[in-house]
Amino acid sequence: MLDTTYNVETPEGIDLRAQAAGPVPRILAYGIDFLIRLAVFIALRIALAFADRAGDGIVLLCTFLLEWFYPVLFEVLRNGQTPGKKAFGLMVVNDNLTPISWGASILRNLLRFADFLPFAYASGVVSMVLNRNFQRLGDMAAGTLVVYRQAQHQAATLPQVAPLAPPAGLQLADQQAIISLTERHAELSDARQRELAGLLEPVTGKTDRAALGYLRAVGCWLLGERRGGGRAQ
């Protein structure tokens, strides 16, 4: 089975994951956006039918703005989603999975001209098929990709451990790291969790599985669990 998972590790050692979107949903999303632009164009033509050459000029100007800035405005101001992409649960992000910036969005959309060649986005489709992350030429140049928008997560299920009060003087950043590790215990592999727990050895004084169990217990306490709790030594 083709694995479309895209992984990024942040400088803080946190793994981010997304599912890259393939050509089919992207083409369908583009079709919806194209129909919206076409409807606007037809409406303008009808509204300005009696404006003679001035009307033609306004229509041409609006067509230019629609073609080049419709996707940019939606991508930057609407969380990476044009109406078409929203219909299929897609969004454009930077390749480090951060929200797309103005510069990246403008560049990827300007290069749609290169993806269009030689006929009807043939280059874009070919580059998407050959690229592991389904990036077209504009995406590769701008450092962006199209991924499936993740559904809102429900409240995290906490590990089944007795909560333990944290030691006095635990720094806020350490508390946040412990909470994040505890909430994501079902998403990360056991080996990865033990590796991350080892990073806090200067704080916990523990290593490997003992450190992980200790941090889970403290994390549960920090998240409000109290039943059967104790005090860290």
Image (cartoon, rainbow, N blue to C red):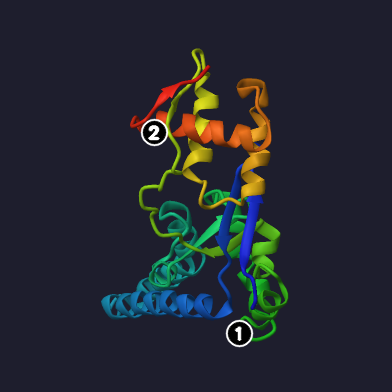
| C-alpha distance separating marks 1 and 2 | 53 Å
Instruction: Name the kind of residue labelled 1 in the image.
Output: Ala
Q: Nearer the viewer, residue 114 or 123?
A: 123
Q: Residue at coordinates 64% horizontally, 63% vertically from top-left? A: 139
Q: Position of residue 159 (x, y in %)?
A: 46, 44
Q: Is residue 170 visible?
A: yes
Q: Position of residue 188 (x, y in %)?
A: 58, 50
Q: Which residue is mark 2?
A: 223
Q: Nearer the viewer, residue 117 or 231?
A: 231
Which quadrant of the figure has residue 230? top left
Residue that protrudes farthest toward the top in the picture: 169
Q: Is residue 177 visible?
A: no
User: Which marked residue is nearer to the observer: mark 1 or mark 2?
Assistant: 2
Residue that protrudes farthest toward the right in the picture: 130
Instruction: Name the kind of residue labelled 2 in the image.
Output: Leu
Above/below status of 131 relative to 208: below
